[in-house]
Image (spheres, rainbow, N blue to C red):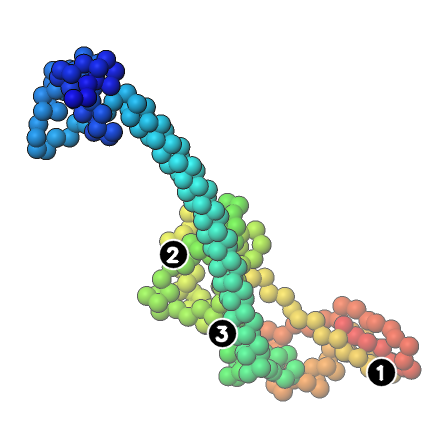
Amino acid sequence: MAGCMLCKSTENLWPCDQCHGKVCETCSKLTASEIKCLELRKGRILRFYCKTCEKDLISEVKKLRRAVGEQSTKIETLTTEIAALNTKFQNLEEHYSKQSDNLEIVTTEIKNNAENKLLYSEVAANTSGEKRRKTKDFDSVIIVKPKEVQESRKTKKEIKEKIDLSRLGAGVSGVKELSRGQVIIRCGNEGDREKIESKIQEEMSDNYETKAPNLKFPKIKVVGINEDDDNTDEGLVEAILEQNLQNRQQTEDDFHMKIIKRLKKKMKNNYQLL
């Protein structure tokens, strides 16, 4: 009969659960409670290992821990890389969303300009015909300006989150980001503009203010002015009105024209007017 692997004793031997070699109670230094657990024939959880197997197991556990640590480091690195990729994807998504909005605005402008192109006489007379009304509707815009410095895309995002256009029943043909955190909203018509502006002031007045764009008078260059004609500013304005306006009475209050510059060219008895 094989004795203890350490002292060769043949009494009170316990087999190693790994290598099945035997060790006596004295050499194993098992406690009384540990011996009772090892004596169980069914459902025994406690395992007994000789010194050699115990060292080998400890070494394997250390290797496993190192491997787990390495895998954890790799997982952290991959998580960081995935987060960076998600950020890049979001930036690309916002970029293409912005480009899509800009494209929509440009497309709408081209379409409206093609449909609503007016004669010079209609513009100068400020006529109230159907074409003019469409142009005015399209020019119904709101500029939303943040009270604190921030990016325009944040302004645009908060407007979309806080203003429900579908519930408000207001049409928007486009939203464009401007400098200094500002956003311009192109409304379907003047009524839509008033609804949206009122809602923005109601919901977002703590952080934002709204304003209308500063409109400028258009400049027109007239070429081929004959020096033999009335050469005074008043006379030239009167001649332009006489030749182009269909109804002079419409222009008494809302028409504005003045000559701001004369351009001399090398043309016989002719010059340009701005």
* Residue type (three-letter) at the residue carrying disc 1: Asn
Does 175 sit above or below residue 115? above
Q: Secondary structure at mark 1?
A: strand
For residue 161, the mark is 2
Callout 1: few (<14), some (14-19), or many (20+) C-alpha neighbours within 10 Å? some
Q: Secondary structure at mark 2?
A: helix
Give the CA distance from mark 1 to mark 3.
39 Å
Q: Assign the C terminus to one quadrant of the image.
A: bottom right
Where residue 83 appears, as percent x and y from the top left, is 45, 47
Residue denoted by label 1? 226
Q: Assign the N terminus to one quadrant of the image.
A: top left
Q: Secondary structure at mark 3?
A: helix
Question: Which mark is in front, 3 or 2?
Answer: 2
Dividing the picture into quadrants, the one containing residue 19 is top left
* Residue type (three-letter) at the residue carrying disc 2: Glu
Give the CA distance from mark 1 to mark 2.
60 Å
Where residue 84 appears, as percent x and y from the top left, is 48, 48
Question: Which mark is in front, 1 or 3?
Answer: 3
Residue denoted by label 3? 137
Where residue 258 appears, as percent x and y from the top left, is 72, 71
* Residue type (three-letter) at the residue carrying disc 3: Asp
- At 85% from the left and 82% from the top, the residue drawn is 226
- At 48% from the left and 59% from the top, the residue drawn is 93
